[in-house]
Image (tube, grey):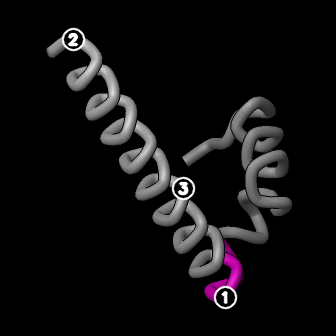
Amino acid sequence: MKYTEGMEKAMHASHGVGYEVYSQKHEVRIDVEQQREQDYLESRRIVADFNRKFTNHIS
């Protein structure tokens, strides 16, 4: 896959590494994917909390 400059910038901004390092180093890949999983779970908690508050407010 060819990575665009924007993708490279986003990877650096989010995880502090570029795609080349990410694709070559297993430990880096594991760290990045664990952080992505944590970010995903946190976003799910935020959405669930918002929905709970919104639903309680309407009722």
**Is the Cβ of the residue at disc 3 closer than 8 Å to that at disc 2?**
no
Which of disc 2 and disc 3 is earlier in sequence? Answer: 3
Q: Which residue is mark 3?
A: 39
Locate the C terminus and report the quarter of the image it occupies. top left
**Residue with the mark numbered 1:** 27
Report the magenta stretch's main SS: helix
How many marks overall?
A: 3
Q: Please tell me the numbered disc located at residue 17.
A: none
Is 24 in the magenta? yes
| Foreground of the two, 23 or 16 | 16
Amino acid type indicated by mark 1: Glu
- Residue 9 lies in quadrant: top right
Residue wearing tag 2: 58
The three-letter code of the residue at mark 3 reads Asp
Tell me how far mark 3 sits from mark 1, CA to CA.
Answer: 18 Å
- Position of 13 relative to 25 (above/below): above
